[in-house]
Amino acid sequence: MTTTAPAPPDVQAGHTAYAPSTWHQLRTLGLAMLRGFMRDRTALFFTFFFPLMFLVVFGLVFSDDKASRQDLGVVGTGALVQQLPKDVFATKTFPTWDKAVAAVRNGDIPAVVRQQGGTVELRYAASDRVKAATIQGILGAVVDRSNVAATGQPPRTTLVSQQVENAELKPIQFLTPGLLSWGIAFSAAFGASMTIVGWRRRQVLRKLRLAPVPVSAIVGARVGVSLLTAFAQAALFFVIASLPVYGLRLDGSAWLCVPLLVAGTLAFLSIGLLVGSIAKTEEAASALANFIVLPMSFLSGTFFDISQAPSWLQTVSQVMPLRHMNDAMIGVLARGQGAGSIVAPMAILLGFAAVVTFIASRFFRWDVD
């Protein structure tokens, strides 16, 4: 006697099994990742508020015109001393020459100047060679101009200078691109690496692999969350930097930040994927991500200009994606450059993302070893 196995309940009812679309799976995974991210207060702090702290502090420091002036001690009321440019020097008067020189030796001021008859004396601290050279150069120009004026003859050569950028631009225009790029690099690299390692240790990756979910949906959800985070960071940066106290201006080329944010996020996401593929624990992932992102931030000109660095160090910085994103963001936000200026940086960022993602795929593991 033969028996017939009962059909599944859905077939018995005349219905086909439910198969969610790839778009539904991608959206579900993305929402799950986003909810997990929003519930992690530490991740929220280091993603949004930590980079924003640098923007607020640096913006306040450099928005103060007095902070950009050189401190200079003065003794006496010599005619040349009174002609020192007040937009360049913040002068501090000392009662005696000895006390002023002592202040220079103690590091309280970088230099002191006085005029005795036809002689202008300058004492400076060689510990800061940049400030010393700047002060010597400016004072030398003041003395030369005075000597020319004393001859009664018009100067033979006149210097006509003008800045190439809009004169209304403030320092925040040059600070925001670098700090925003660094913030996106920080969140994308750390977010991806910590998610991969955490999901692997909790066997979420293993369950996803066994479930009928295509890899493209998992990768797409992670990319979508990273892009959404990057755009939220950019919006927050632009809102804060545009406050009157800072004065960021977004002109017609500001929209070019959008494709740059996409390309940059993909590049930094690939770093996070590589770190997450290699590291076995969250602690190792955090240390390895720091090992890559922190030096990259300094060598890419995020916090200071590296144009004076040794040539070999500048060559190393050209390998780093953050350097190209910084340069491109400054070009469109501060210098008003057009679409042609971002073609090469975007090609480098996307190429970097493709190469590093391929390398990461060779090390990626679904399960804990």
Image: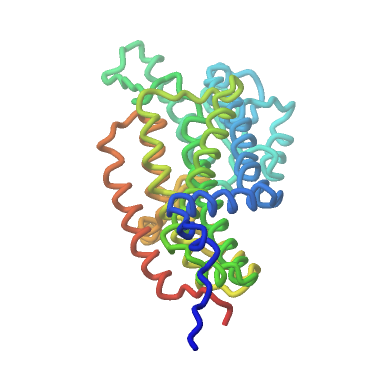
The colour scheme used to paint the residues is rainbow
**In front: 205, or 337?**
205
**In front: 67, or 293?**
293
**In front: 100, or 14?**
14
In percent of the image, x 59 and y 32: which residue is there? 59
Toward which corner of the image does residue 367 lie, by quadrant?
A: bottom right
In percent of the image, x 62 and y 66: which residue is there? 198
- 110 lies above or below 29: above
Lateral position of residue 36 relative to residue 137, left or right: right
- 355 lies above or below 82: below
Can residue 115 be seen from the camera position used here?
no
Toward which corner of the image does residue 330 lie, by quadrant?
A: top left
**In front: 16, or 322?**
16
Q: Residue furthest bottom?
A: 1
Q: Quadrant of the C terminus?
A: bottom right
Residue 254 pos. (x, y %): 40, 29
Toward which corner of the image does residue 53 lie, by quadrant?
A: top right
- 205 lies above or below 83: below
In percent of the image, x 35 and y 11: which residue is there? 152
Residue 308 pos. (x, y %): 42, 49
- 83 lies above or below 368: above
Residue 358 pos. (x, y %): 36, 68
Residue 110 pos. (x, y %): 61, 39
What count of labels does the image hold? 0
Can residue 300 be seen from the camera position used here?
yes
Lateral position of residue 353 relative to residue 127, left or right: left
